[in-house]
Amino acid sequence: MFRSIGVAVLLALATSGCGSDDELPSGAQLVTDVSALRFGQDVGEGTYVGTSTFNALQIENGGTAALMISAVELGGASAFSYELPPETGLPITVASRQRTFLQVRFQPTAAGVVEGTLTLTSNAKTPRTVIALSGHGVAAP
């Protein structure tokens, strides 16, 4: 089911080991690989209106307790939306030293720069993690 604000964030869980045997912080710790996702802006191009581009957000649990993501929310323009796979409901649980990925889709409806946010609410020490989203829609040739 799509949660609308227009980029589909397809939540694809891919579990793999993270970290070493070093001591981890106690409790759950949500760590992302980036603080912002940009769509079609890095090479001066953009995403054609009516088409889609994708980015992946890596989420890792860098703590000792299970990380539970209880909410995923979008803010901003309707070019952003997300979808949870049928086998993955909320809360999303990530074990210690494990990771998961959110696949984010940008689908502009008009030419121009579009901005938004993706907010993850969890049981981590910092309960809300906000990822900035930006995309550049361009008219098709």
Image (tube, rainbow, N blue to C red):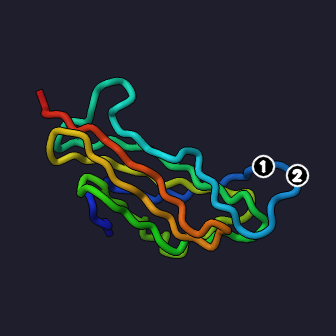
Rendered location of residue 128, percent (x, y): 54, 66
Q: Residue at x 48, y 72 (%)?
A: 71
- Is there CB contact under 8 Å for labels 1 and 2? yes
> Which quarter of the rendering shows the N terminus?
bottom left
Q: Residue furthest top?
A: 43
Crowdedness near tag 1: few (<14), some (14–19) or many (≥20) residues, C-alpha within 10 Å: few
Residue type, numbered disc 1 = Gly
Q: Quadrant of residue 81?
A: bottom left
Q: Which mark is residue 22?
A: 2
Rendered location of residue 58, percent (x, y): 56, 50
Which residue is at the front of the view, 58 or 12?
58
SS at mark 2? loop
Rendered location of residue 34, percent (x, y): 54, 44
SS at mark 1? loop
Crowdedness near tag 2: few (<14), some (14–19) or many (≥20) residues, C-alpha within 10 Å: few
Q: Which residue is mark 1?
A: 19
Q: Residue at x 16, y 48 (%)?
A: 109
> Which quarter of the rendering shows the C terminus?
top left
Q: Residue at x 13, y 32 (%)?
A: 140
Distance from Cα at disc 1 to Cα at disc 2: 8 Å
Give the left or right position of residue 32, taking residue 41 as reference. Answer: right
